[in-house]
Image: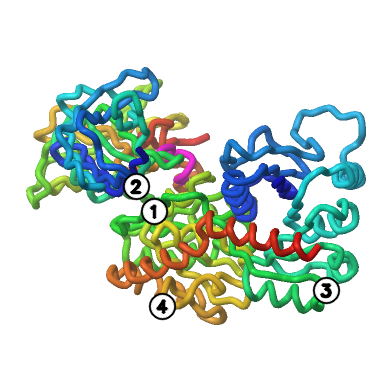
């Protein structure tokens, strides 16, 4: 079977890109898989892509290129339309609502068309109008499934398929380094400032613990200034980006996530796979969907005194190695459900069921 | 013959200790191959007669007789003509163990680690006595540094050693010293920043700190290498202090040695 995954770009460093690369790598063991990026901004993808996966792109946006036509949205849309019209494949999976709408409008009907969704529906009008032409929607979490089901009113079957981890074996933490790690782009939505403020409390009481931040982004300068203001320059390491986040998490004893909204939570899943407990804020759309408080991680309520509450949760876990190990065991059980082969099986079942219906 | 390392560590006696999970029991005549990544030089270690039944194997390989040079060495298992690179799920070291490893006097330091692609590798470095920096502070007009002495052979006890912190610069040449505290292998040193400015007035430049400890032959350079974080110049930014309007900032060189930059 030939499967195409349509994504805005496979070249960046994001959780959804990691998830798509993992899924494509596993599906390529059994099928012919191609990842189509709408835009190509770099020479090589940030995350290593399995050798069996074919990469292609619609618009070349690498810096330094010279093009006949001007760049811009119109050119991209026309190029995407042409690509979709002429696409020869059995299954086409779109990974953004915007792309899902284009697939519903322009991709040939004989192709099994599936939309992969992480967040809530961003633009109800076009989705209600065009999504019924798709064969299925695959949501990443149960909350997201309910929202999409509600919006689409039963016109398209919506199912839940979790994100895939890379093929194992996954690295395993020994829990003996005094390190708290956090991964993710340094952007405002990830609220790393809350983590740094909470870690200031921890560093005051347990000065031999260190915080390692993995990732890069526009907030880096501001966060470095905050680290300077709080006198944490010996404690907080800006580790930069890495393509092996699970390996780096395996060197830590705790993984912290302070996102305001974490629609995807790929770093949370990767932390669990490394056998490290996660401390996160319990928001309505946060990592709470993946973390069960007291079983495989710790959830802290948002609101007033959230920084103090987060710091005391970290300190409690730092001081209790036995509890850390218990939570890590629970985390590994959750991670098993995200194994690449079991996720790929669920995709195959969904594809088989939708093509039968079609 | 896929093999996954579930535990890897270089012990204090420079023995590479591995715990392996193998799909098929290891055959007689299996060798552990260490291959230098840069020069492709190989070193082979026969593994003796393994238990034919077991799917778990424990290996202990003494590294000193292999005469491995500095660099990174990849690990393989070779059975006849078939060669498998060893996958690893273990980070390969713990930071506390690295501190304990650095207590002895050594000329070569070995460290097992997991590569970014998930394979076991060995890092071999030239080891010379150094002062490993753990914290740097600018407080009350002084530069303060704490850390521990590495590869000096001193014992980690309560014994105090006479020591001084020296700061040197060239063009124009200048030197400053102050008394430092060394207890066991832990050190603490401080220096007035006003003295630093007064030693080379109106001159921008970089000062090289070093620690001179009685009982250790050479002056110890201040560096930070006893962990897995390379490139601290980029990853750790220390804040600058302003003395009489001149900014003074500690920073690391490309090979993780501490410097103090004045002005600029």
Which residue is the site of mark 2?
A: B91
**Residue A121 shows in this picture:** yes
Give the Cα separation between the discs numbered 4 and 2: 26 Å
Which residue is the site of mark 3?
A: A155
Image quadrant assignment for residue A201: bottom left
Q: Are marks 3 and 1 in contact (CB under 8 Å)?
A: no
Mark 4 vs mark 3: give the one in front: 3
Q: Are marks 4 and 3 in contact (CB under 8 Å)?
A: no
* The one of B148 and B208 positioned closer to us in this rendering: B148
Looking at the image, which residue is at 26% across and 22% down?
B43
Q: Does label 1 lie on the same chain as label 3? A: yes
Residue B209, image x, y percentages: 31, 34
Q: Secondary structure at mark 2?
A: loop
Chain part drawn in magenta: B230-237
Which residue is the site of mark 4?
A: A294
Residue B222, image x, y percentages: 29, 36
**Mark 2 residue crowding within 10 angstroms, few (<14) / some (14–19) / many (20+):** many
Q: Secondary structure at mark 4?
A: loop
**Mark 3 residue crowding within 10 angstroms, few (<14) / some (14–19) / many (20+):** some
Which residue is the site of mark 1?
A: A250
Q: Are marks 2 and 1 in contact (CB under 8 Å)?
A: yes
Q: Chain of mark 2?
A: B
Give the Cα separation between the discs numbered 3 and 1: 44 Å
Work out which residue is located at the far front of the displayed protein and give it.
A356
Give the Cα separation between the discs numbered 3 and 2: 49 Å
């Amino acid at each position: 079977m030939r499967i195409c995954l349509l994504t805005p770009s496979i070249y960046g460093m994001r959780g959804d890109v990691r998830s798509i690369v993992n899924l494509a790598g596993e599906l390529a063991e059994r099928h012919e898989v191609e990842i189509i990026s709408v835009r190509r901004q770099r020479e090589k993808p940030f995350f290593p892509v399995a050798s069996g996966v074919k990469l292609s792109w619609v618009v070349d946006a690498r810096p330094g290129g010279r093009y006949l036509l001007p760049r811009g949205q119109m050119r991209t849309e026309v190029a995407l339309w042409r690509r979709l019209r002429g696409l020869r494949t059995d299954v086409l999976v779109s990974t953004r609502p915007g792309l899902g709408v284009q697939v519903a409008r322009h991709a040939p009907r004989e192709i099994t068309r599936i939309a992969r969704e992480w967040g809530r529906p961003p633009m109800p009008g076009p989705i209600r109008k065009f999504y019924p032409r798709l064969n299925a929607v695959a949501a990443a979490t149960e909350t997201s499934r309910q929202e999409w089901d509600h919006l689409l009113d039963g016109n398209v079957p919506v199912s839940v398929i979790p994100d895939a981890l890379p093929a194992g074996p996954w690295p395993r933490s020994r829990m003996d380094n005094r390190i708290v790690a956090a991964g993710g782009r340094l952007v405002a939505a990830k609220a790393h400032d809350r983590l740094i403020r909470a870690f200031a409390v921890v560093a005051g009481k347990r000065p031999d613990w260190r915080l390692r931040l993995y990732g890069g982004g526009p907030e880096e300068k501001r966060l470095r200034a905050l680290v300077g203001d709080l006198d944490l320059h010996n404690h907080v390491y800006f580790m930069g980006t890495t393509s092996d986040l699970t390996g780096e998490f395996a060197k830590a004893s705790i993984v912290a996530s302070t996102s305001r909204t974490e629609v995807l939570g790929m770093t949370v899943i990767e932390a669990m796979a490394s056998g490290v407990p996660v401390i996160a804020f319990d928001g309505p759309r946060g990592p709470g969907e993946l973390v069960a408080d007291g079983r495989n991680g710790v959830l802290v309520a948002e609101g007033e005194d959230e920084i103090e509450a987060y710091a005391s949760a970290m300190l409690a876990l730092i001081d209790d190695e036995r509890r850390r190990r218990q939570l890590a065991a629970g985390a590994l059980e959750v991670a098993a459900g995200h194994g690449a082969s079991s996720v790929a099986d669920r995709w195959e079942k969904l594809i088989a069921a939708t093509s039968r219906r079609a | 013959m896929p093999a996954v390392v579930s535990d890897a560590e270089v012990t204090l006696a420079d023995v590479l200790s591995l715990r392996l999970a193998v799909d098929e029991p290891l055959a007689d005549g299996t060798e552990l191959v260490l291959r230098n990544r840069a020069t492709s030089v190989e070193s082979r270690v026969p593994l003796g007669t393994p238990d034919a039944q077991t799917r778990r194997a424990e290996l202990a390989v003494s590294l000193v007789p292999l005469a491995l040079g500095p660099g990174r060495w990849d690990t393989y298992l070779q059975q006849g003509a078939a060669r498998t690179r060893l996958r690893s799920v273990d980070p390969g070291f713990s930071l506390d163990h690295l501190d304990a490893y650095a207590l002895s006097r050594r000329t070569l330091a070995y460290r097992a680690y997991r590569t970014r692609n998930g394979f076991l590798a060995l890092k071999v470095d030239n080891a010379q006595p150094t002062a490993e920096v753990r914290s740097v502070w600018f407080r009350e007009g002084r530069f303060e540094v704490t850390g521990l002495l590495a590869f000096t052979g001193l014992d980690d006890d309560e014994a105090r050693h006479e020591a001084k912190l020296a700061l040197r610069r060239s063009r124009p040449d200048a030197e400053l010293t102050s008394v430092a505290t060394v207890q066991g292998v832990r050190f603490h040193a401080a220096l007035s920043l006003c003295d630093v400015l007064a030693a080379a007035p109106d001159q921008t430049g970089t000062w090289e700190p070093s620690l001179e400890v009685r009982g250790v032959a050479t002056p110890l350079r201040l560096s930070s290498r006893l962990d897995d974080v390379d490139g601290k110049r980029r990853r750790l930014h220390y804040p600058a202090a302003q003395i009489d309007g001149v900014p003074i900032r500690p920073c690391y060189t490309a090979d993780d040695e501490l410097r103090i930059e004045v002005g600029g």
